[in-house]
Amino acid sequence: MDRILELQDVGFRYEKNWVVRGIRLQIKRGTFLGIVGPNGSGKSTLLKIMDGILHPQEGDVLFEGISLMKMKRTQIAKKISMVTQETHFHFNFSVLEVVLMGRFPHLGIFKFEGKRDLDIAKEALRLTDSIDFAHRPINTLSGGEKQRVLLAKTLAQEPEIVLLDEPTTFLDLRYKTEIFEIISSLIKEMGLTVVVVSHDIDLVSQYCKEVLLLKDGKVFDMGTPKDVINSENLRELFDCQILVDLNPITGTPRVNLIGGS
Amino acid sequence: MEDIQGPPVTPKKVIIISSLSIILLLIVATVSLILGTAHIPFNKLLLLIKGRLGSNDPAYLIVFKIRLPRILLGGMTGYTLSLGGVVFQALLRNPLAEPFILGTSSGAALGAVIAIVLGMGYGVGVPLMAFGGAVFTLSLVIVFGKKGAGVESSTILLSGVIINAFFTAVIMFFIATSTHTLLHNMLYWLYGDLSQSRFEAINIIFIPLIIGSIVLYGLSTHYNLITAGEEEALHMGVEVEKLKLISIVVVSLMVGTVVSFSGIIGFVGLIVPHLSRMLVGSDHRVLIPVSAIGGAAFLIASDTLARLIISPSELPVGVVTAFLGAPFFIYLLRKRGSRWIES
């Protein structure tokens, strides 16, 4: 199968200790990959490496066979986009203005967004079900609305890969599901490739095609949700009592936390 | 469903809003030419512009030799300080940022004070020393804040604050040990003094102002993105480190050049960007021209008042900008909240 992004024995450290090391990973075009792991296991670092903003000291990251380190930032931003954990705008912009910012890598200096850019932004707003508040100031939206707008901004970038760093952390149950639902439909409709870092393992197991378990900066296990999300793996990964059974409706692995042990 | 007519910012919108700002600027400048200790009626001004009055007419001297260069210098200074304020507020994601926040002004002030103590003239010595001080401070801030390929925002901010404090102490030393006349000159310089304006200064400022404006305007969309954070901008394709370095150097050199001739004029670079943001929003493709032109108009108006209030004597223009600016700003804050900043 066609691989879009390849990590070749990637190792990265900020200072002395390796944050991630020996990561060998092939991401297939059109897949939905979930990365799961405890706090500090290197998940966010791994995403930043995939977006080329951190350069690994060991190994290489290839987008369609070309090293990210040899590509310019705008070049990468046309192919790979990222929704960060928390984005805060320090001055006031409308939702439409924010989504149009996604066109940045496609516009040159002294250029303005034209009709085509506007159409792309509108489509992105429609796909994320956020067109109704296009004229509202971004900082007045609720968490769920804002996350959808940031996803729309990412789509306006017209990337081939979308990376999401814990997109559902601050959302309630309904919005959590909604985000995963929107992402799945985007993969189907637009052939996007998506990598999500998430602590919502139930949602990862329902929506993702593949799951990577990360522990201490190394790949602990990787495979389909049914293969890797099981009691033994999660107990070892998170070092706590967990029972994984099957969700009676979807038939996907379900996490049950067991306290008091 | 809300309808979306067109992109929020178009070249047409930028041109219309900038033209309106320029009209305002021209009105302010014209009024400033008329008003003063010697009143020049409007019809006489028209005759002067048409060239009907000879160069030995006293009105000719007042308008073309005294008021016009002063208006031009004031306009360019206001323009540069507001432009610098807008850029630094975006770059540092700090609504309190102003063009002097990195210490450039105190470096320039120290240079100027030393030049005044040494008895250097206002034509060459003082501006040259002030500019040298500004460049020296800029290099210090960059050296202190250097990290990898770029500079770290929090470090340069802190360096700026500390350099400011240190240089202010040195300036105070000179003030404390100076004679009465020198003291007067120093204080006027420190609060902004446009009374020494000459066409030579305007020629020197003009070129860096044009080049700097083009460079900074070209980076408008970059400033939009960086308001959401450096990492966010990086993900979107902005070369953040390059952006910071270019902006800091360009703004500081532009500011260093104007303050060398005008002295330290506070408040313009803080208040005009905020007023402009209230009026036209946060997109820098509109915000930058409106702030810059608005800054020019604001400073010309303030300087006209500085000439009038205790006429025939005059106040340092920085006193007027702060005296008018501060209460007006508080009024707006109370009335509007800080909605235009973050909502």
Image: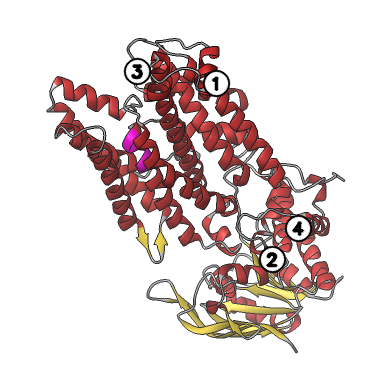
Hey, what amino acid is under mark 2?
Asp
Residue that badge 4 annotates? A117
Residue that badge 3 annotates? B315
Determine the chain carrying the residue at label 4: A
Q: Is residue B67 left or right of residue A205?
A: left
Q: Can residue B90 be seen here?
A: yes
Q: Is residue A242 above or below residue B241?
A: below
Task: Determine contact: label 3, label 1, CB under 8 Å.
Answer: no
Residue that badge 1 annotates? B331
Hey, what amino acid is under mark 3?
Leu
Is residue B42 magenta-colored? no
Task: Determine contact: label 4, label 2, CB under 8 Å.
Answer: no
- Could you tell me which residue is drawn at 35 percent across and 36 percent down? B201
Mark 1 to mark 2 CA distance (whole Å): 48 Å
Overall secondary structure of the magenta stretch? helix
**Marks 2, 3: nearer the viewer:** 3
Q: Which quarter of the image is occupied by the N terminus of chain A?
A: bottom right
**Marks 1, 2: nearer the viewer:** 1
Q: Secondary structure at mark 3?
A: loop
Is residue B257 magenta-colored? yes
Magenta residues (range): B256-261
Q: Position of residue B190 (x, y in %)?
A: 29, 29
In-front residue for pair A177/B221:
B221
- Could you tell me which residue is drawn at 48 percent across and 22 percent down? B301
Residue that badge 2 annotates? A200
Q: Secondary structure at mark 1?
A: helix
